[in-house]
Image (cartoon, grey):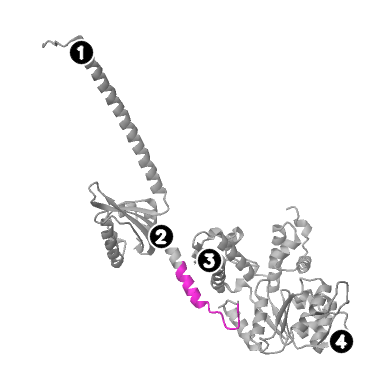
């Protein structure tokens, strides 16, 4: 055994050095373990993010073979993960698209990122419009190793755009029918009738549910006639108390009643040579009905508080959302006035009977909203359109317009999806529209619907007649008469 001649001090110094080396090794090992754990956690976080991503994520090697796909990519393409891994991208795209992809790959070889739209094919053969954001993967020496890509399926948006283009081409409003958007057979027949009778001086009654566009049709009658350069004056007969309505229609002389400080020309005289549109004609009081009958018979009027008879040349178009014949039977409307008003009747179909017009109307409303501000909405998703076409629309076109405006305001993307539609519409829109007992007669079915609709309105607004009437687009008195007709008590809905 070789004898160690080092001194005690030298041996102690070497022992200290060895201890430091051992301590340094232990520190390095702990640091390495910490780094490995941090790397493992980082990899786990990235794995979770990739697997939970809504967008498709893929990795390809330098020969465009797939080496990784996340679950969203698997679902998008309809293949199994084991089928996709190892597949060449040329098997998922047509040759023209793949050739463009190869050109873009050359750019990535130079370290450039690509953002482009392309077309891929699912396993079932269905084509997909996709947006691809691709970035190169490089080795330590800078050589190209492959591509990481994020893929978004935009098929429904492109289809919506194509449908909107088709609708814009179809959306050619018929001359003389401003604001009326329709291609359904029922509305085409209405517009044909309007053109046929426009130049007649005969009185017209327009019948239709609330929100079907009665005033627009009245305006079209006027604008298609030889009276188009004279005034068109509409008035809602149900919106004013009787004494104010009489003054609005006939005018008054100074001092005719308290507050009449000056002579006023009424609408019937102001519309000289033109057209007066009397909406909700059924709400006229019996006294005013007598005076209106005299105007139609004699073509003369007398202002409130006046003695002079004034000749007038006007066409009277009236509208109602109720059956005037039924109101006559109830003693609330004069039969002789009805015959004077109802020389020609135009019946407007409700929106639930012209569902093919809904896509055109939606496009028309969106176009108007897009023009009002900076926000631009490209159209509606197909699922949204289907829900709109499966809804019964008790408020008709006016309700549809309100729904579109609401959806426009709530939509943050470029396409209106079903998530921004009212819940009641989505619930009913998932079922067949307007389900009702078909064993009932037409009159019985209508009564059943109206009663149910009024009851739901009262329930929704807690028996508040004013708010329920506003939602229905009716004057309060008209709404009260309807709920009385169906035996509904507003008080029974309060507190519910």
- Distance, label 4 to label 1, CA atoms, is 137 Å
Mark 3 Cα-neighbour bin, 10 Å: few <14, some 14–19, many ≥20: some
The percent coordinates of residue 152 (x first, y second) are 40, 58
- N-terminal label among 3 and 4: 4
Kindly identify which numbered label has been placed on residue 153.
Answer: 2
- Distance, label 1 to label 3, CA atoms, is 91 Å
- Distance, label 3 to label 4, CA atoms, is 60 Å
Q: Secondary structure at mark 4?
A: loop
In the rendered structure, the answer to whether residue 104 lies left or right of residue 488 reads: left
- N-terminal label among 4 and 1: 1
The percent coordinates of residue 8 (x first, y second) are 20, 9
At x 25% / y 51%, what residue is drawn? 145
For residue 462, above or below residue 355: above
- Quickly name the residue at label 3: 386
- Quickly name the residue at label 4: 308
Q: Secondary structure at mark 2?
A: strand
- Mark closer to the observer (2, 3): 2
Q: Secondary structure at mark 1?
A: helix
- Mark closer to the observer (3, 4): 4
- Distance, label 2 to label 3, CA atoms, is 21 Å
Kindly identify which numbered label has been placed on residue 11.
Answer: 1
In the rendered structure, the answer to whether residue 93 lies left or right of residue 288 reads: left
**Span colored in magenta:** 160-178
Q: Which picture quadrant has residue 147?
A: bottom left
């Amino acid at each position: 055994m070789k004898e160690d001649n080092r001194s005690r001090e030298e041996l102690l110094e070497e022992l200290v050095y060895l201890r430091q080396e051992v301590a340094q090794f232990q520190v390095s090992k702990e640091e390495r373990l910490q780094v490995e754990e941090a790397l493992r956690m980082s990899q786990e976080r990235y794995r979770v993010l990739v697997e939970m991503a809504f967008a498709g994520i893929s990795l390809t090697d330098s020969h465009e073979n797939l080496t990784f796909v996340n679950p969203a990519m698997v679902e998008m393409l309809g293949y199994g993960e084991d089928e996709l891994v190892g597949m060449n991208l040329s098997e998922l795209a047509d040759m023209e698209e793949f050739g463009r992809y190869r050109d873009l790959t050359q750019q990535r070889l130079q370290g450039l990122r690509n953002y482009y739209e392309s077309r891929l094919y699912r396993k079932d053969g269905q084509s997909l419009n996709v947006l691809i954001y691709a970035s190169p993967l490089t080795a330590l020496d800078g050589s190209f190793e492959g591509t990481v890509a994020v893929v978004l399926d935009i098929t429904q948006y492109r289809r919506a755009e194509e449908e909107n283009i088709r609708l814009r081409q179809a959306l050619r409003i018929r001359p003389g029918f401003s604001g009326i958007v329709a291609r359904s057979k029922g509305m085409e027949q209405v517009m044909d009738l309007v053109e046929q009778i426009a130049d007649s001086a005969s009185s017209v009654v327009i019948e239709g549910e609330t929100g079907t566009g009665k005033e627009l049709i009245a305006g079209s009658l006027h604008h298609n006639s030889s009276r188009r350069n004279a005034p068109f004056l509409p008035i809602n007969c149900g919106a004013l108390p009787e004494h104010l309505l009489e003054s609005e229609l006939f005018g008054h002389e100074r001092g005719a009643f308290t507050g009449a400080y000056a002579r006023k020309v009424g609408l019937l005289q102001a519309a000289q040579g033109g057209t007066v549109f009397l909406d909700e004609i059924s709400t006229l009081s019996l006294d005013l009905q007598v005076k209106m009958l005299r105007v139609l018979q004699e073509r003369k009027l007398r202002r409130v508080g006046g003695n002079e008879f004034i000749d007038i040349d006007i066409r009277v178009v009236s509208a109602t959302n109720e059956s005037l014949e039924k109101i006559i039977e109830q003693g609330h409307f004069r039969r002789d006035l009805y015959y004077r008003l109802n020389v020609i009747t135009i019946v407007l179909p409700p929106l639930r009977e012209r569902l093919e017009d809904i896509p055109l109307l939606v496009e028309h409303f969106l176009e108007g909203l897009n023009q009002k501000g900076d926000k631009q909405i490209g159209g509606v998703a197909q699922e949204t359109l289907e829900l709109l076409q499966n809804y019964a629309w008790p408020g008709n076109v006016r309700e549809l317009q309100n729904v579109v405006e609401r959806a426009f305001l709530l939509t943050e993307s470029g396409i209106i999806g079903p998530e921004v539609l009212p819940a009641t519409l989505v619930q009913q829109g998932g079922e067949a529209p307007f389900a009702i007992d078909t064993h009932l007669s037409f009159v019985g079915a209508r009564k059943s619907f109206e009663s149910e609709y009024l009851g739901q309105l009262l329930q929704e607004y807690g028996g508040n007649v004013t708010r329920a009437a506003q939602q229905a687009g009716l004057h309060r008195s008209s709404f009260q008469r309807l709920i009385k007709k169906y035996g509904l008590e507003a008080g029974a809905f309060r507190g519910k």
